[in-house]
Image: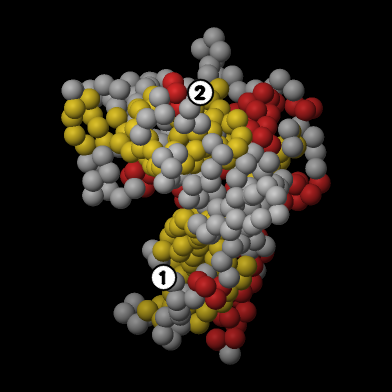
Amino acid sequence: MATEVNSFVSRKKLEILATAIRDQMPYIRASQQAFPQESMKGKKYGAKVTEYLVDAGTVSDGIVANPDAIHEREVTAFVQNKNSAVETTFWENFHNIEDKQKNVIRKRAEKIAREVEADVIRHNALVGMQAIAKAKVGGVSAPDFEMLSDAATKLAELSTVGSLVDFQAPTVYGKIANTGLAKFLPDSIQQDIYRERYLGQYAGAACVEQALMPKISLSANADTAPTLTFTAITDDNSNIIGYTVGALTASGAGKTLEEGAAYKVPGVYLLDESGMETNQELVVIVHKKIDGLVTSTVNGETVVTKANQGKLAESLGIEDLFVTAKGYSFGTPNVWVDPTTFDSGSATTTVTCSFIDGMGAGKSYLVGQVRTEDNSLVMDAYTYEDLPGSRRENVGSDGPIVLKAMSFGDGKNGVELTRIDVSFLAKIFEPRRCVVTFTEI
């Protein structure tokens, strides 16, 4: 009988936990599930999961087919887990669950939810290949409606499919709303999804407050003009069909590339996901500082190399760049260049491209993100094997999160313990579906 009571009460508490968790995860709620549970079976904490992005191929004129090979590139993510544990003797002694939920159960739910939400945001908020930096005006932080509409427009220029959602810190939305709150148009469906975090629609995007959006600070040594080399790939007729990304060089001694720094790359433009060339300039956003990379010094300048570091993109946390020449479809490209004008039309085998900084050194910014609502962030739950002798309850949270509670005896201390786990995989696999905003503060 004790076991039956424990099972019932655990499920009731899990349902209360799940409801509270759902309301604390607006960023995660704007996601899709991509990996079926069967493919996650046997995965453990830290396990790698791989997604394959394919190229859009080529289109030929006339009735003669010119088949080409399918090209794939790997994008990886890793299984994460967070848990909270409690003595079941205390957990089960509630006589009235509803009276206690705000005091204990809801607090635990909100703590788990915010930890998971913060972790997912931390790893995905800087993902994007376009960005907008909004500088102070007269020494005062000045985000505005133009910043929001510009971000949405950049995605429209890429023919991005799907509804948009815009996540900003409450401070940012507060300043914008002061200039025209009525411009945020209500939507009952979005209100149901995001609850009190939802402000309204603007420029085709659901505007959602998220206090966990990060802040970045660039030191006085932040590099404002690093360079990146591109090496040409030619076909049998010596035509340049694409480029590989080479070494990254600082603009001077002591200069650093820092987390959150964003640079336009002149002459490099985005392809949309169907492989069509656009006029949207590539923006490289650094996800982590270059400290710890293999470096060498040439003429007093630091050269970041790829030796023993794998791909440069992995080392810096920037997005992988696959460069095709105009009119070609080399590999699985996401950006294109015109070899006849790239780097002043040199059309040489090695091009050195100087980044254009839009942020400046010694400044701080609040990070925001505008992205597609249901096909950019992938969020999948999984459940691992039970511990021997434990009792388990699973319950979903009206979204991608699944709570797993296991109860088991602690013979050493003579109590029963319950641990609540949230196991998940979260990743934006296609960065072209995101625009990152930076509001100077």
Residue situated in front as seen by the camera: 2 or 34: 34
Number of marks in picture: 2
Above or below, 18 relative to 144: below
Question: Which of the 4 image quarters holds residue 401?
Answer: bottom right
**Any mark on residue 31, and which?**
none
Residue corresponding to mark 2:
440
Image point (34%, 32%), residue name: 350
Q: For marks 2 and 1, give the CA distance.
A: 40 Å
Q: Earlier in the sequence, mark 2 or mark 1?
A: 1
Query: Which amino acid type is marked by label 2?
Result: Glu
The residue closer to the viewer here, 348 or 35, is 348
Q: Is label 2 in a helix, a strand or a loop?
A: strand
**Residue 83, can we see it?**
no
Residue indicated by mark 1:
44
Q: Are marks 2 and 1 in contact (CB under 8 Å)?
A: no
Q: Which residue lies furthest to the bottom in this view?
A: 1
> Picture coordinates of residue 104 (x, y %)?
55, 59
Q: Where is residue 84 in the image (x, y as percent from the top left)?
A: 46, 63
Q: Which residue is drawn at 51% across and 23% down?
A: 440
